[in-house]
């Protein structure tokens, strides 16, 4: 008789194998990290003797669930802000992430997430976030299985100042973790719309080189699809295909708005789809056409998405919601019945994350990732035995994550009798409370009343850019204009306009949002006639003005919104403590200098009436490091223009006006 | 200092009063069944001294939730059959209910339901089912608050053989329970489409007489709305209004498909709406336009619906789903934010069930129906304090029903530290398992393979009718035909057709579903030419043939479906053990006799070739008692027709053919 490590003796074993076998009074035989065998208890007891037997005879034993899409570390941002438009929500979160997301942050957030996921019966999760090496280290220490996608963006991120640096960071991550028994590193271009074609192609190439998956967002919102058609003349799936992403082992999150052709393309490439029902409802993205995807034959899994947009990591809620929602897509209550919904959460998810050869079902030779669940709570009582298959509907429609009792991953118990075995939950929670207090302080500092009032009023866009700028008074404009016409400058656009600014000043506001600018731009044509105009509101901070080399200043624009109402309205609405007007006539050139874009302004300040001209050179950037590089370029440009920075003024026009 | 019964000392008190006050470190002062006062702890401690203090300082204390629509006793049918079309589902359930639903059944089912609801923080529920006096007795004993609607249907029900009897039963229920401190009895016409106008009007009258609410289903599905427009030339809400239902304190469940005009009408009458998001998805009914209802100013509450269509009674799941779903109705993620979703589950629900003067918020003078909840699980961590209002999003988007710790109703603890105080849960669950076993046996008996196969194949309709019938061989048809032309018969319709029946017989099938009939009717015109035809499949039982007086037999037709495929297909699909053909030419009269409808057939059996004629008199009925009455009428009709029942044949044609 063969000696093995463990028997898991279940009331019912749900195998989720190809024939959906159910074994009443069954034993799963685990040896090392693997399932050696499984079958009726008597049969297994006759073949093997086990060092240890887990008595789950009053429980269901089934494959652990696969959370096919999340941003685990965002547990630390859970419930911070809800019920907002997606753009506002991102505008709210992204500055926070830039401020707080460090390797320590993601490690702590991952600990919380793993605790919650293990408790709710998840054994594998597919992640996408920043500082994934820290996520990998923490996850491996805890003993969970994960596909971890290192995010690459065209913008600076908490871990990489540029996308090229992001690719490099990702490569190092793959080198370090590929081949680990628990961790499958992956490449995560965030989405096509935060990527250039070069970025997408570089990600695909990197993933193919290491033979690792790509984990990205595709077709989350209708707006995204419309934008893609407009910009790329095709749909997001096909655009990803054109840029090589579908050649990889792709895991595409959301796919709320894909058509049948795109489904066929995803199927042809063996791509996985992660359906995130809660998040798609909460952010108003829509309802994914899951029944049709399954009809076409796509590999569909279910994900929780990040806890900042869900707000939890409860796969029982997601599976139930997936099953319920599918029934209104085609007005058919027989769509996505319970067994199929559970399939998506287990073997379907395993296929979607490209691990179906190892996990997703209980079968000899697969890894021992399994969970046990009690279904004898009053909320799941009584049981009917006329059809053994209704165990699936008990699990999907009535069970709760809190019914999970034991969780094994890779042959190791991570939850026993509802106690976490590898996570110090109280310590992690205490640390999380400290981080939350820091975030609270940051938010309170930021969210003085003008900000909140603006958020409430308008569709605010977060202006993510840092702005490097220099301002120098001049006696004459013509010499500058002459120099701009030739090498090394290339003019890409030239405009002329009158700019009427009214600044609302707030005495008691926090310094990050102390000024609200109402700006009316009147564009001038050849004959000095006003051709068009636009109005915008911008909430500005003052303390962000740091001085770089060459007297270049660094500022951060904060929040911007189209001004759809009158100045009089805004005056009454915001009740500023002080009001300052600045009017000027501006000539503006957009120029390329050493492959970088700059704006060059020649301003005449009309109110308060000011002698002479001001030269401004400005550039947007996405990171502090890039700002330093651009400050250096501005210094070179000043030399080319024959202007010294010794006269540079370290103030905004409004401050000049304010000080008289 | 005033002495009071109880302090409930909370970390945060969520009042849900008109200004949504939150009290940090607050005390709710309870004296008897009432909230005497509430406020900051220090203030309350200075004013009152309490006999007992419940220390909930690490918890949230809030009003108990109002489950605005359920069929509580259906816990005993939970998960019995899922993922079916609504008609199939009803066809499956209704015969079971007729068989099993007794006062003992509903009492036990209510015990289970109350246990589950109390555990999930529900303090008041609005019910609609049969044998409500038993529901009332059980609920009052447990100590829960409820609006209990006694169902009235135009069909026989488990408690009333006719709707008139139903009204009488309901009146007795109102007399017994109206004025009870916990139980609000109500009148429940099931829905307009299971009611005649007279029934609706009688219900409205009864409710007004006792000044009690009416609890009914309105506009659950699009099909219902279409049928209403077709039959009544108006919408379900307006049809109810025309029949006086809106004059009452109405609680309208579902309202998935109501328009703005109907919303305004409901608002004008102060009607309540119960939104049931899980059930509406699961049965594919649709998504109710809740944001618009709230915009119009309707009183909207949230309900779980019955546990047979949900499959649990978890208000946390419903509130979360209500908040999430609302955001895709108008593609607006700011619709139904967390606080408003919780409002619907508390004070909104109280308004919808017409109890807002007594419950729904924590305010001095209201009844002490409150719950306490821990929000410190890892699934709800960390907490941010920059905005105290985000306690609502923690409750709505991340809390689970299992986070509920204590529940007080009418000043009495029904759940303390998660232990039920007034329900013997283990005993109730053991009894429920026994009932489930009986139901299992019934279902297994019924569901032999032909039934299941039919269900899978076609859109099956449950034929709810009993059929009374007599069959008598005759030498000549003409004397009968002559007699039918005059008093006391009134002919309403006359047809002639050839009927080609093929019976599939199953040896091992259960006797309830032993024969499947494929029937092709060829309708004949004046000139004996076939004018039209139709094909139907009917699954028939044999054991239901009971003999009543006058040799009248009682049978129950089982399930009927349009036959959309060929006989050859069905033969291969069902693989019957035996096949019997019966062809006949039939002349059929629909006649009214003493205000009852009967079908009279004069049949010539062509295959197997049979001499002479057969006279059949048949009538559908909805109850055994009515069948006995109709058997008596058939006896009278035979006398009028001059036919003796001594020759009556107690067999179906197929049995005559079978026996040669």
Image (cartoon, coloured by chain):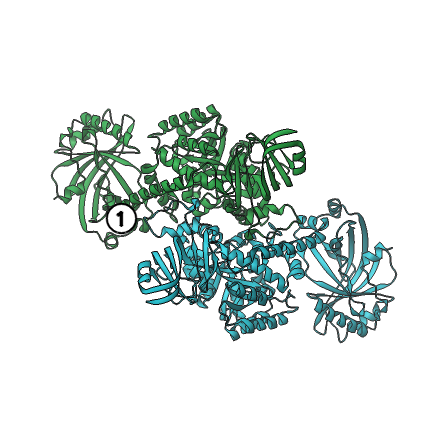
Chain colours: A green, B cyan
Q: Residues within 10 Å of mark 1 (few under 14, many from 20)?
A: some
B324 vs B178, nearest the viewer: B178
Q: Tell me residue B560's x, y (percent).
A: 69, 55
Q: Tell me residue A79's x, y (percent).
A: 39, 46
Residue A78 shown left or right of residue A521 in the figure? right
Residue farthest along the front direction in this orientation: B51
User: In the displayed structure, would residue B554 be above or below residue B456?
Assistant: below
Image quadrant occupied by the C terminus of chain B: bottom right
Q: Is residue B256 visible?
A: no
A310 vs A242, nearest the viewer: A310
Q: Residue at x 29, y 44 (%)?
A: A441
Q: Tell me residue A64's x, y (percent).
A: 54, 38
Residue B226 shown left or right of residue B517 in the figure? left
Residue B75 shown left or right of residue A318 in the figure? right
B609 vs A130, nearest the viewer: A130
Image quadrant occupied by the N terminus of chain B: bottom left
According to the image, label 1 marks what residue?
Answer: A448
Callout 1: residue from which chain?
A
User: In the displayed structure, would residue A429 be above or below residue B248?
Assistant: above
Quarter of the image for residue B597 reads: bottom right
Q: Is residue A373 visible?
A: yes
User: In the displayed structure, would residue A442 be above or below residue B317?
Assistant: above
Q: Tell me residue B436's x, y (percent).
A: 64, 54
- Total marks drawn? 1
Q: Secondary structure at mark 1?
A: loop
């Amino acid at each position: 008789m063969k000696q093995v490590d463990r028997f898991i003796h279940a009331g019912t074993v749900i195998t989720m194998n190809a024939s959906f076998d159910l074994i009443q009074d069954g034993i799963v035989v685990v040896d090392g990290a693997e399932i050696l065998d499984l079958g009726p208890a008597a049969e297994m007891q006759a073949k093997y003797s086990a060092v240890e037997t887990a008595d789950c005879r009053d429980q269901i034993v089934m494959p652990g669930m696969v959370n096919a899409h999340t941003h685990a570390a965002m547990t630390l941002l859970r419930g911070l802000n809800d019920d907002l438009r997606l753009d506002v929500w991102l505008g709210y979160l992204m500055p926070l992430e830039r401020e707080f997301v460090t390797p320590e942050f993601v490690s702590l957030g991952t600990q919380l997430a793993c605790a919650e996921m293990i408790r709710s019966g998840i054994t594998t999760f597919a992640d996408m976030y920043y500082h994934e090496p820290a996520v990998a280290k923490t996850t491996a220490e805890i003993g969970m299985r994960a596909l971890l996608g290192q995010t690459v963006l065209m913008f600076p991120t908490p871990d990489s100042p540029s996308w090229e640096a992001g690719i490099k960071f990702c490569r190092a991550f793959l080198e370090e973790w590929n081949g680990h028994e628990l961790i499958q590193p992956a490449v995560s271009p965030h989405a096509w719309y935060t990527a250039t074609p070069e970025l997408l192609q570089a990600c695909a190439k990197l993933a193919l080189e290491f033979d690792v998956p790509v984990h990205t967002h595709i077709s989350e919102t209708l707006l995204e699809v419309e934008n893609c058609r407009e910009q790329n003349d095709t749909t997001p799936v096909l655009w990803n295909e054109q840029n090589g992403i579908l050649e990889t082992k792709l895991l595409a999150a959301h796919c709320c708005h894909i058509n049948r052709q795109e489904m066929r393309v995803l199927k042809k490439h063996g791509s996985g789809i992660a359906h995130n029902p809660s998040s798609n409802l909460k952010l108003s993205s829509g309802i994914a056409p899951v029944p049709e995807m399954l009809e076409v034959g796509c590999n569909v899994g279910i994900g929780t998405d990040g806890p900042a947009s869900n707000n939890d990591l409860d796969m029982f809620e997601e599976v139930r919601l997936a099953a319920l929602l599918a029934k209104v897509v085609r007005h058919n209550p027989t769509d996505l019945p319970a067994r199929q919904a559970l399939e998506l959460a287990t073997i379907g998810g395993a296929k979607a994350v490209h691990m179906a050869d190892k996990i997703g079902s209980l079968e000899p030779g697969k890894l021992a990732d399994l969970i046990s669940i009690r279904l004898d709570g009053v909320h799941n009582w009584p049981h009917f035995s006329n059809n053994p298959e209704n165990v699936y509907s008990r699990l999907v429609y009535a069970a709760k994550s809190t019914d999970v009792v034991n969780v094994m991953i890779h042959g190791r118990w991570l939850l026993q009798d509802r106690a976490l075995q590898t996570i110090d939950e109280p310590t992690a929670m205490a640390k999380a409370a400290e981080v939350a207090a820091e975030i609270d302080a940051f938010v309170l500092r930021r969210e003085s009343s003008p900000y909140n009032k603006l958020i409430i009023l308008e569709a605010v866009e977060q202006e993510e850019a840092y702005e490097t700028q220099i301002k120098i008074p001049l006696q004459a404009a013509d010499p500058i204009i002459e120099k701009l016409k030739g090498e090394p400058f290339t003019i890409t656009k030239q405009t002329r306009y009158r700019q009427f600014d009214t600044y609302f000043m707030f005495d008691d506001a926090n310094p990050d949002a102390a000024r609200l600018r109402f700006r009316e731009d009147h564009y001038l044509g050849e004959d000095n006639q006003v051709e068009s105009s636009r109005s915008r509101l911008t909430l500005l901070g003052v303390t962000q003005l740091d001085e770089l080399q060459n007297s270049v200043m660094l500022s951060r624009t904060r929040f911007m919104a189209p001004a759809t109402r009158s100045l009089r309205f805004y005056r009454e609405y915001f009740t500023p403590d002080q009001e300052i007007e600045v009017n000027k006539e501006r000539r503006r050139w957009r120029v390329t200098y050493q492959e970088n874009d700059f704006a060059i302004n020649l301003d005449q300040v009309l109110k308060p009436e000011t002698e002479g001209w001001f030269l401004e050179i400005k550039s947007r950037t996405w990171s502090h490091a890039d700002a330093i590089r651009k400050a250096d370029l501005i210094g070179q440009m000043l030399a080319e223009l024959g202007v010294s920075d010794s006269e540079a003024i370290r103030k905004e026009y409004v401050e000049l006006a304010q000080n008289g």
